[in-house]
Amino acid sequence: MIKLTDVSKKYEKEMVLKKVSLEIKKGSIFGLLGSNGAGKTTLLKTMAGIYKQESGDLTIDKQTVFENPTLKQNVLFIPDLPFFFSQYTVKQMAEFYADMYKDWNQERFDNLQKVLDLEVNKKVARFSKGMQRQVAFWLTLCTMPEVLILDEPFDGLDAVIRQKIINLIIQDVADRNMTVIISSHNLREIEDICDHIGILHKGSLILEKDIDDLKSDVHKVQIAFKDVPTSLFESLDIVHQEKRGSVHLLIIRGNKEEIDQLIKQTNPIVYDLLPLTLEEIFVYEMGGVGYAIENILV
Amino acid sequence: MFDLDLRSRQPIYEQLVEKIKELIVNDVMKTDEKLPSVRTLAQEMTINPNTIQKAYRELEMQGYIYSLKGKGSFVDSLTKNISAEEIEKIRNELQKRLTEAFFIGISKEEIYTLVEHTYLDVGGDRKND
């Protein structure tokens, strides 16, 4: 289990993380979302033990990560720009990894070569951006990590490779109970694979929840009436309201059955209740903290 | 094995629950048949194992499947223990659809025939098998 208690981090005078508290269970796939510059990468690097927090506690399986080489054997981080030694071939990189990580799995390395179909004797620098990322996954997965921390991991991967990589990650989660933390801007992608998500904004964690709970807590309602019952709107916890012609579009927080009942009592002519997509949740939650989408006219 | 719509707004675990229920209700999966393990299903469908676990837990709670420690999950005999909540839910849905049916002018007799047909299709009174 990964546990953060009031973790704060600053760069010189600028506070980048403000008292972030978070728990990630073993075997979970956690999605970290956030506005640009929210501190996602800083948070991931702190979890990976690359940065040291100014205050607060951060433990993985009750051990501190920072400067703990034994623990770091099984905590792997892939940055948004994967790093390789210049002039090294894939094979030389693999030898380096095999030296560094005691759980290095050569058999898996050879098997993955067939899956990814990349040349081992080619210099990594000569590969394309997407292929370099594949190499990063290839090397990392062969160290048999317990915790895998990924910063914008699917950037630059085509749909087929992305699916392959996600499948490999999921196998490790199913087989070895690996914990995965993913930051991404591609909400569609995160929605499909994560079971928990957290939203970071200006260094604070504004939300952390089971993704299905999150979805069953907010609903999108499209509704039209002959006579608009004003009392209905008062009795609902409305996050957002819009009117398009005679159709009202509402984002409502609360229990699905209760909302359903309240609305049905008013005999609407048109009525649809839909779960929200993660993208919509993100937009409305961010709107709640003053990071709204405004239609900009230039 | 199950066809899920990843673009749908409906949560994946709910889709899974419904798909499996459908297979059980239509007798594609028989009583005491073993469900695929969480691991296999996760791997085959590229779905988070936690999501599958959740769907199985939900199905167990609703009385569609039972699980044996270390052996996996199996289809439960249906008539025994479908929860009262689930029955109530289906009853409400039926009522809602019937209201709509009457509204658009389907006659009472037609609905009776439909009920008869469906009843025969599922093999009569399965409770007394």
Image (spheres, coloured by chain):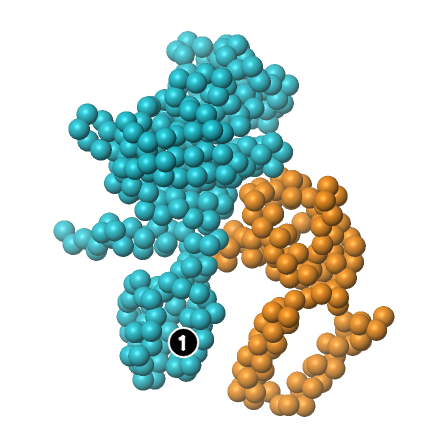
Chain colours: A cyan, B orange
- In the image: residue A29, left or right of residue B17: left
Q: Nearer the viewer, residue A20 or A282?
A: A20
Image location of residue A209, percent across then percent down: 43, 48
Q: Is residue B127 above or below residue A124?
A: below
The residue sitting at 30% across, 76% down in the picture is A246
Q: Residues within 10 Å of mark 1 (few under 14, many from 20)?
A: many
Please identify the quadrant where the C terminus of chain B is shown: bottom right
- In the image: residue A3, left or right of residue B64: left
Q: How many marks?
A: 1
Q: Which residue is mark 1?
A: A263
Image location of residue B111, percent across then percent down: 66, 85
Q: Nearer the viewer, residue A160 or B110?
A: B110
In the displayed image of the protein, which residue is found farthest to the left? A298
The residue sitting at 40% across, 39% down in the picture is A22
- In the image: residue B68, left or right of residue A147: right
Q: Is residue A110 visible?
A: no
The residue sitting at 39% across, 35% down in the picture is A4
Q: Chain of mark 1?
A: A
Helix, strand or loop under label 1: helix
Q: Nearer the viewer, residue A64 or B106?
A: A64
Q: Is residue A189 above or below residue A157?
A: below
- In the image: residue A294, left or right of residue A119: left
Q: Nearer the viewer, residue B84 or A152?
A: B84
Image location of residue B62, percent across then percent down: 64, 61
The residue sitting at 57% across, 57% down in the picture is B15
Q: Is residue A100 above or below residue A210?
A: above
In the displayed image of the protein, which residue is found farthest to the right? B129
Image location of residue A95, percent across then percent down: 53, 10
- Name the kind of residue labelled 1 in the image: Ile
